[in-house]
Amino acid sequence: MNQKKKNLIVFGTRPEAIKMAPLVKALQEKSDNFITKVCITAQHREMLDQVLDFFEIDPDYDLNLMKPNQNLYTLTADIITELKPILEDFQPDYVYVHGDTTTSMSASIAAFYSGAKICHVEAGLRTFNKLSPFPEEINRSIVGRVTDFHFAPTASSKANLLKENVPEDGIIITGNTVIDALNFSTKKVNDSEFVDDEIEQLKSIVDSSKKLILVTGHRRENHGQGFINICEALKEIAIINPDCDIIYPVHLNPNVQKPVYELLSGIENIKLIQPLSYPSFVWLMNLSYIIITDSGGIQEEAPSLGKPVLVMRDTTERPEAVETGTVILVGTDKNSIVDETQKLLNDTNAYTQMSKLHNPYGDGFACERIVNHILNTKNLAHQ
Ligand code: UD1
Ligand code: UDP
């Protein structure tokens, strides 16, 4: 019998967990072929645990690294140092990292030192602007340099890698695993046995007679003046539109919590709430009229739900939804955020144009493609 291939999946933040959860399940299902272990850095803690609970993932290793208001230097160093004994002990053939976080970048470097083959899920996203998003653009470029298997979500992400002279036979277009996660979540929530206390609580704050504007934000390059502008824009939108409710699950980063709670508390039609579990957030996205965000993942989910998204950034590495019209980049200028929101609220044609259902990011079978590719790969790292 063939030797089983050993997989180590490493992630640390909420979005990585959401997008890696279906891959964990898909690899674990192939237990005749693989020994699969999960290592969380816990770069995020509560926001990561929410996802692990929902997807019922019990990590084999928990580095438990999150510190309040952590910095990039020590987080990077800690991840590399703490992964060393795990890599030496388990000796994985394949290490899977996702996207562009500090966890992904540091884990890919550690995996490279260990001699494992590196699998990059959500490979090839680029803005080609070193500082936007910061530090993610450089993180994903570094991961790309050490990666053996680039699982690119779209043709345009593959094209970005080819521009960087990545060999074509190492690039596999899979779609984005976020759609696999979205489908998993929708199926689980629609199961008659599924009960979610958080969704029940949310029902008491959602006013169905009003249009719902859903907001999230966290990007490092928006910390400081960017968040002040965002909050001032939201305040003005709330005042001009008493027939709308803004619901804002506030990211736990203190650089976000402080300005948001200081500037937006006490406004009647702005509801500031804790970060939501994934199924509750998907439920709320489905009810929303407009989404205003600087998130990467939400830009990918919204087209599948037919929701217009105003993105509070100057650049995006996800051009597909801009091209098909679901996403508009509004930056963090107060007037742009207010003007584009008012246009969507008052111009039915503009709204209809932006709220078409489409799936530029995948068909829900990304994980199956990744697993099949690894199953058909012959080489083992440590032979
Ligand atoms: C990180 C990622 C970013 C990703 C985002 C998703 C980096 C550099 N940044 O940014 O790419 O888009 O996650 O949300 O990798 N905190 C908590 N509890 C939590 C999570 C965070 O208290 O569950 C607080 C802590 O004080 C922590 C701080 O938020 O130190 C910042 O967390 P960090 O992961 O460094 O940055 P994010 O802005 O979350
Ligand atoms: N999300 C969530 N709860 C929330 C807000 C967002 O589960 O309260 C989900 C959202 O559906 C998406 C992901 O978190 O899948 C996006 O995470 P985030 O915006 O923090 O990171 P990014 O995608 O920008 O890296």
Image: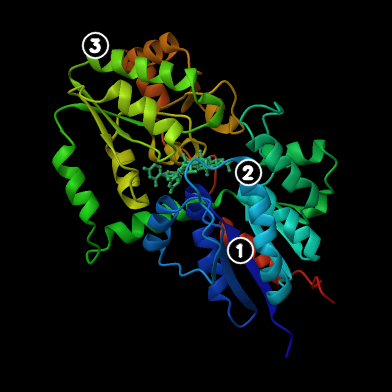
User: Mark 1 or mark 2, which is nearer the start of the sequence?
Assistant: 1
Report the residue marked by disc 2: 100
Residue 17 horizontal/vertical position (percent): 50, 55
Image quadrant where one finds the N terminus: bottom right
Q: Is 87 displayed left or right of 383 in the figure?
A: left
For badge 1, the amino acid type reads Ile
Report the residue marked by disc 1: 9
Residues at circles 1 and 3 in contact by the CB criterion of under 8 Å? no
Height in image: 382 above or below 151? below
For badge 3, the amino acid type reads Ile
Q: Is 272 displayed left or right of 140 in the figure?
A: left
Farthest bottom residue?
1
> SS at mark 3?
helix
Report the residue marked by disc 3: 240
Q: Residues within 10 Å of mark 2 (few under 14, many from 20)?
A: many
The residue located at (35%, 54%) in the rendering is: 186
Image quadrant where one finds the C terminus: bottom right
What is the spatial separation of the Cα atoms under label 2 and label 1, in whole angstroms?
A: 15 Å
Q: Residues within 10 Å of mark 3 (few under 14, many from 20)?
A: few
Residue 155 horizontal/vertical position (percent): 68, 41
